[in-house]
Image (cartoon, rainbow, N blue to C red):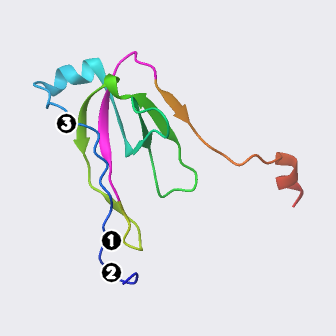
Amino acid sequence: MADSPFPSKFEKFEIQAFQKPKDFKSLTKTHVPFSGSPQRHPYDAEKIILITDPFSCSTLYYEFKTKNIDYLEELSNLVDIRGKAITMVRIWVRRLSVGVRCAPFIVEDIQNLTDE
């Protein structure tokens, strides 16, 4: 059944319920939005990882403490050509809170690339 044109079942990642803000204009003054696919942090239950473009080979991710996230919006899921669906969200993080931005890459010598 792997060749089915329909999306396959995926495990939903539950973060927690967030209250809808009373005024979005005031939310934009106190928070900054980040969009991506939420993932559990591998060893810290008080943090979340947000992968910006999960299907890209050159993506980056953010790491935030969940206590600094005050609102979450569900976005449209992404589906690849094999039918694998990925949950996408927009989180609103408090201004001046600390986050980590990480862009993994493969280490390569530039000179080796230009010699070819």
Range covered by the magenta-colored residues? 86-98
Quadrant location of the N terminus? bottom left
How far apart, in angstroms, are the residues tagged by discs 2 and 1?
A: 9 Å
Which badge, 2 or 3, is on the more N-terminal residue?
2
Q: Nearer the viewer, residue 90 or 49?
A: 49
User: Picture quarter containing residue 80?
Assistant: bottom left
Amino acid type at circle 1 is: Ser
Q: Is residue 61 left or right of residue 39?
A: right
Numbered mark located on residue 8 in the image:
1
- Above or below 31: residue 110: below
Does residue 109 appear left or right of residue 50 in this picture? right
For label 3, count other residues whose C-alpha is less than 10 Å away and answer few (under 14), some (14-19) or many (20+): few
- What distance separates the C-alpha of mark 2 from that of mark 3? 32 Å
Locate residue 35, reporting x and y percent.
36, 41
Whether residue 58 is situated above or below residue 29 in the rendered picture = below
Q: CA distance from mark 3 to mark 1?
A: 25 Å
Residue 17, label in figure: 3
